[in-house]
């Protein structure tokens, strides 16, 4: 990048809006987008209504971050060239700033369109045609909203993954050492599901399927199931625990609280599961692919755009406990097949879902918006 290009980018001040700073897929994806654009020379700032663990991440990157509800209108009107709103739940911020619609880029990561319209009566369909650009993370999710595309402003940009930190982690850590650190035996096979415990992500059915696998395990394999993302005192969490207790597998199926040390869990995992009912283009699947893990996932929305059935992983219908158990048993039995799928998953993320490609696409959109104003 020459000096003139760098100066021009710095003139393009980008204000990002996040509904919170929790360790969730949508908010983490925004963080990595902000990080990448900052490194490309853009002046970036983040505004969040709620605080959370990601504030420290932004501070470490030297990204100015504002917390609270007041002052946002002034920031949008006066202090940014482009206003990037993360997730469909930013609609109310957009609708309060429609006089700046020509510089608003809206990233929609949610596929359950009708649910959001049902729950949020003030969400206006006209909003979708008034903003400058709407970016979807998968073609499938974009199709869900296509009827609202009156201005031809819909674009798909897949999430991309920065592989260097993951590769550095893999090079510096040993799987057996990490297992020992968490009290898992060297010869135990680890099957993991990662994500905030909630109905949408299907951890209850995962627990039920895990119980089936353990009950049917004639070979007496040492299998450990990890459910990472526990929320305490939540009714759904209690239901998951009740199922595990009912079958007597409290030692074999373990709930683990949300953690920043997520790479440790990918490292010690032998099989990854994503059992969501609704997703768009989940970051956890990209991360599992980067760790060369065989994957069992639900065939919903953008997931089959990430992994192809029988190649990078195995796909099932959401809610099918028996098929989930069957697919997990298949990969446990056919270790060579599982390893081959993991290798293909790594190759695919390297080829199709790179961080560099994602950042370049966003840069192009930002430049288009700036030049059009």
Image: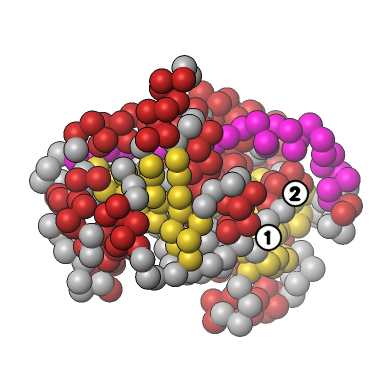
Residue at x 39% of width, y 56% of height: 17
Residues packed near mark 1 inside 10 Å, few (<14), some (14 to 19) or many (20 plus) = few
Count of numbered circles in the view: 2
82 vs 266, left or right, is left
Asked whether 344 or 218 is in front, the reply is 344
Residue name at image x 70 percent, y 32 percent: 167
Residue 244, above or below 6: below
- Ranked by sequence position, the earlier of labels 1 and 2 is 1
Considering only vertical position in the picture, is 105 above or below 156? below
Q: Is residue 6 found left or right of 258 in the rendered image? A: left
Could you tell me residue 51's position as x and y percent?
53, 67
Q: Which residue is mark 2?
A: 264
Mark 2 packing: few (<14 Cα in 10 Å), some, or many (20+)? some
Query: Element under label 1?
Result: loop
Q: Position of residue 227 (x, y in %)?
A: 65, 62
> Is residue 20 visible in this depiction of the protein?
no
Query: Front-most of 354 and 289?
Result: 354
Q: Report whether 5 appears left or right of 271.
A: left
Residue 118 horizontal/vertical position (percent): 23, 71
Spatial separation of the CA atoms under disc 1 and disc 2: 10 Å
Can residue 148 be seen? yes
The boundaries of the magenta stretch are 153-179
Q: Are marks 1 and 2 in contact (CB under 8 Å)?
A: yes
Residue topped by disc 1: 259
Q: Is residue 20 left or right of residue 144?
A: right
Q: Tell me which corner region of the image, top left, top right, bottom left or bottom right, holds residue 259.
A: bottom right
């Amino acid at each position: 990048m020459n000096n003139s290009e760098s100066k021009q980018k710095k003139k393009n001040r980008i204000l990002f809006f996040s509904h919170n700073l929790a360790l969730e897929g949508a908010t983490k994806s925004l963080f990595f987008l902000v990080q990448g654009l900052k490194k490309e020379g853009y002046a970036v700032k983040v505004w969040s209504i709620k605080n959370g663990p990601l504030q420290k991440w932004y501070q470490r990157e030297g990204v100015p971050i504002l917390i609270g509800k007041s002052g946002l209108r002034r920031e949008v009107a006066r202090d940014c060239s482009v206003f990037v709103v993360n997730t469909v739940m930013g609609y109310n911020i957009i609708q309060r700033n429609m006089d700046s619609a020509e510089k608003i880029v809206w990233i929609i990561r949610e596929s359950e369109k009708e649910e959001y319209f049902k729950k949020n009566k003030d969400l206006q369909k006209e909003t979708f045609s008034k903003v400058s650009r709407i970016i979807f993370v998968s073609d499938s999710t974009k199709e869900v909203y296509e009827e609202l595309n009156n201005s031809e402003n819909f674009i798909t940009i897949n999430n991309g993954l920065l592989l260097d930190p993951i590769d550095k982690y893999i090079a510096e850590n040993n799987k057996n050492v990490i297992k020992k650190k968490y009290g898992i035996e060297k010869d135990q096979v680890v099957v993991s599901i990662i994500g905030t415990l909630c109905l949408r992500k299907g951890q209850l059915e995962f627990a039920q399927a895990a119980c089936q696998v353990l009950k049917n395990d004639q070979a007496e394999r040492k299998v450990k199931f990890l459910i990472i993302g526990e929320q305490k005192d939540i009714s759904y969490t209690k239901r998951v625990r009740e199922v595990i207790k009912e079958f007597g597998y409290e030692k074999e199926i373990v709930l683990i609280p949300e953690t920043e040390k997520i790479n440790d869990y990918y490292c010690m995992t032998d099989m990854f599961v994503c059992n969501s009912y609704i997703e768009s283009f989940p970051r956890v699947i990209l991360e599992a692919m980067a760790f060369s893990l065989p994957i069992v996932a639900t065939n919903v929305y953008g997931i089959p755009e990430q992994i192809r059935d029988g190649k990078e992983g195995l796909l099932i219908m959401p809610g099918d406990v028996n098929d989930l158990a069957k697919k997990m048993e298949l990969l446990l039995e056919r270790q060579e097949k599982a390893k081959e799928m993991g290798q293909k998953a790594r190759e695919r993320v390297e080829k199709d879902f790179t961080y560099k490609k994602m950042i370049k696409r966003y840069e192009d959109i930002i430049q288009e918006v700036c030049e059009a104003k």
